[in-house]
Image (tube, rainbow, N blue to C red):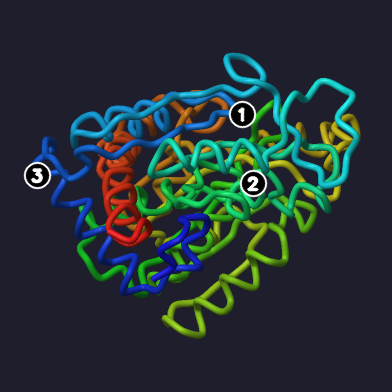
Amino acid sequence: MNSRHFLNTQDWSRRELDALLDKARGFRQSRQGNDLHGKSIALLFFNPSMRTRTSFELGAHQLGGKAIVLAPGKDAWPIEFEIGTVMDGETEEHVAEVARVLGRYVDLIGVRAFPKFQDWSVDREDRVIQAFADYSPVPVINMETITHPCQELAHVMALQQHLGADLRRRKYVLTWTYHPKPLNTAVANSALQIATRYGMDVTLLCPNEEYLLDPRYMEFARRNVAENGGSLTVSHDIESAYRDADVVYAKSWGALPYFGRWDQEKPMRDAHRHFIVDEAKMALTRKGLFSHCLPLRRNVKATDAVMDSASCIAIDEAENRLHVQKAVMVSLCETGNGD
């Protein structure tokens, strides 16, 4: 097990991921405990959060631990991440000191840091969380950067609740949806990874090749298919993608070739508002489940009817964030600090 950090599920074996999910199911049955008694976690939010902050902070509390929430640049000093830079600008301290000092105080560090949406060749390096992982003497948890591993586990946990433990050969549609802004690809990257990891027949549905995900995650998906069965298909045809699907997972994301050129992407994006998940599309599925990581703009990404239907498991998935965060924190404390 990669006991140092929880940055990407691809770093963990299927057996290890299954163990995390088993632990999370235990916490769903019994929310209170002492598994984190005397333990602490620093939660650094460079971007807004509702579910992630609440589930980590409350999860630590319910298990007897302590969470310290920090927003660098707001209630904590702005942090520098470049090596060798002359710090005569806005940043007050370097991650080399921040990570090591926090590591003297706490048992875990959680980091949430979205891309800058200016240059994907830079954003794909995930420099913020990688720097914390490099300098921290304690395990670091990815609370969403360019992937969202905790969301992946909550998603699979919800699918197993409704479809059973064995997800192999279930048809899974990861569909791009319209949104008036260019969003992070993190959840899409993660959904592609985890669905192929569990042997599902995955269709990536997007308007055109401009919306394909980064080759790194496409390659992870192909590797997962080779190792776990299932399949991976890329489609730009809505009807064939939805037909006979068991699961539809919706997310909007920005076209990578247009990072930093929003004015050029916008007309292409606006032409594909019809990718909204609606009743007609869901009627093509095999009584399929629908989910989304949330937050979701109703009647933009999905209609009220879809969100309010019995097939929507987005709330179950969101609840599972609490149980999954506990499982990750406890597992890392058990294996990452020499206990």
Measured from the top left, where is residue 18 in percent x and y? Answer: 28, 66
| Mark sitting on residue 185 | 2
Q: What amino acid does circle 2 point to?
A: Thr
N-terminal label among 2 and 1: 1
In this rendering, which labeled residue sits more in front, label 2 or label 3? 3
Residue indicated by mark 1:
46
Residue 96 position by quadrant: top right
| Mark sitting on residue 29 | 3
Q: Nearer the viewer, residue 285 or 317?
A: 317
User: How many angstroms separate mark 2 from mark 1 (CA)?
Assistant: 17 Å
Q: Quadrant of the C terminus?
A: bottom left
Q: Residue at x 51, y 47 (%)?
A: 142
Q: What amino acid does circle 1 point to?
A: Phe
In this rendering, which labeled residue sits more in front, label 2 or label 1? 1
Residue 325 position by quadrant: top left
The kind of secondary structure element at disc 1 is: loop
Horizontal relation, residue 79 to residue 316: left or right: right
Q: Residue at x 51, y 85 (%)?
A: 226
Q: What amino acid does circle 3 point to?
A: Gln
User: How many angstroms separate mark 3 from mark 1 (CA)?
Assistant: 32 Å
Q: Is residue 232 above or below residue 130?
A: below
Horizontal relation, residue 58 to residue 186: left or right: left
Q: How many marks?
A: 3
N-terminal label among 3 and 1: 3
Q: Residue at x 28, y 42 (%)?
A: 320
Measured from the top left, where is residue 282 in percent x and y? Answer: 42, 46
Q: Nearer the viewer, residue 43 or 97?
A: 97
Pointers 2 and 1 in contact (C-beta within 8 Å): no
In this rendering, which labeled residue sits more in front, label 3 or label 1? 1
Q: Nearer the viewer, residue 334 or 244?
A: 334
Horizontal relation, residue 206 to residue 153: left or right: right
Pointers 3 and 1 in contact (C-beta within 8 Å): no
